Amino acid sequence: MDALGHLNEIAKRKGSSDPLAIILKHVIPELDEGESLGELLTPYIPATEAMVLKAGEASGSLNDALDICARLSGTTGIIIKTFLMSLIYPAVLTTSATISVYLIGTEALPNILSLMDPSQFTGMGKLFFAFILFLQGPFLSIAIPLLLILFILVIWSFPKWTGKYRIYVDKIPPYSIYRHIVGAGWLLAMAAFLESGIGVMEALVISKKSVADKNPWLTERINGCLHTIPMGLNLAEALDVAGFDFPDRETIDDLLAFATLPTFEDELVQIGSESIDQTVRKVKLQSAGLSGFVLLFFASFVIGLYLGVQSIIGSMGAMF
């Protein structure tokens, strides 16, 4: 409470409209009345972090839970930044290339067409001319809004989209990244629940209640475990039989190896922490691969642009 009071004083100095001040204004009085910190913060933080807090309160290790939340938040920020940077670089190259072709089509090409018929273009020159006509059509005015809508739909679908097709999509970025982040947070929350003496079944029910309204995708995966635990399976076996490959195949195999050991809860914490680190490494590797692919594509595009212009110049030279 002392820490929250200190944060509240800092937030007040920034003004009553500061987001932290608004949250603390709601949270602190409720905490004084004995409400759970995890429950109170649930509307304001990601579902996995809310689960970790509730698990920390249940196990009496709230400080550790706060450390895990801070790590999850920081790691998520690093992953998002890395992924966005990997998108910005290709976007800049693609935009500059498109603008270059568009300017050639609007500034230089009309002068060329006043001298010769486009039907006389051959090879790369003919292909280049067709591409310019394509860009001058309704493509850009349609494509840009569609890309924006697609981006919004993808972000919205992370916690909402469920069903068998989502299982396949979860294997590719950016959905695979989301699966790793949420999966690692969920494992750490489950470890805290189990360490506090709460049984697997009860821990699953609590975690389901924590995310039911905010994250149907995670709820579906928890339900997969809830349906199989009564069959006498342990947590690792339940994740395996559920068929969602959640958090991921490698993590499930690790859990199966340690499931029957008395130190399983400790191993669960270790595996969850390693999953976070692996996600960061995978995102950086995938981002590097994407940047390399785009650079190769851009180089090929520039070469094609050069050959197209040279072909048109060659066609003009043959006329005169």
Image (cartoon, rainbow, N blue to C red):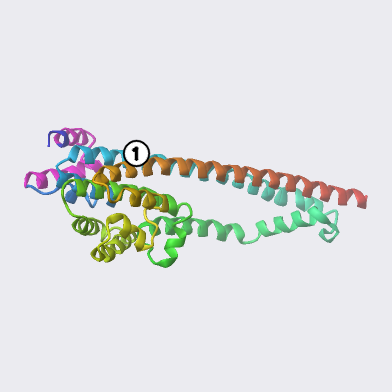
Residue situated in front as seen by the camera: 43 or 283: 283
Q: In the rendered view, does 191 fall on the left or right side of 196?
A: right
Q: In the rendered view, does 226 fall on the left or right side of 123?
A: left
Q: Quadrant of residue 143?
A: bottom right
Where is 196 relative to 159, above or below? above
On-image quarter of the N terminus: top left
Where is 275 relative to 221, above or below? above
Residue 195 percent across, percent down from the top left: 19, 45
Quickly name the residue at label 1.
74
Residue situated in front as seen by the camera: 34 or 143: 34
Q: In the rendered view, does 314 fall on the left or right side of 302?
A: right
Residue 165 visible here: yes
Residue 152 percent across, percent down from the top left: 43, 56
Where is 269 relative to 230, above or below? above
Which residue is pictured at 47% across the width and 43% down the height? Answer: 282
Residue situated in front as seen by the camera: 163 or 112: 163
Q: Residues within 10 Å of mark 1 (few under 14, many from 20)?
A: few
Please identify the dominant SS of the magenta region.
helix
Which residue is pictured at 48% across the width and 52% down the height? Answer: 173
Count of labels in the image = 1
Q: Amino acid at mark 1?
A: Gly
Residue 147 percent across, percent down from the top left: 51, 56
Provide the secondary structure element on which disc 1 rests.
Answer: helix
Q: In the rendered view, does 145 fall on the left or right side of 228?
A: right
Where is 208 relative to 91, above or below? below
Tell me if residue 225 is in the magenta stretch: no
Q: Where does the magenta region start and end? A: 5-33
Residue 315 percent across, percent down from the top left: 87, 52
Tell me if residue 30 is in the magenta stretch: yes
Residue 183 visible here: no
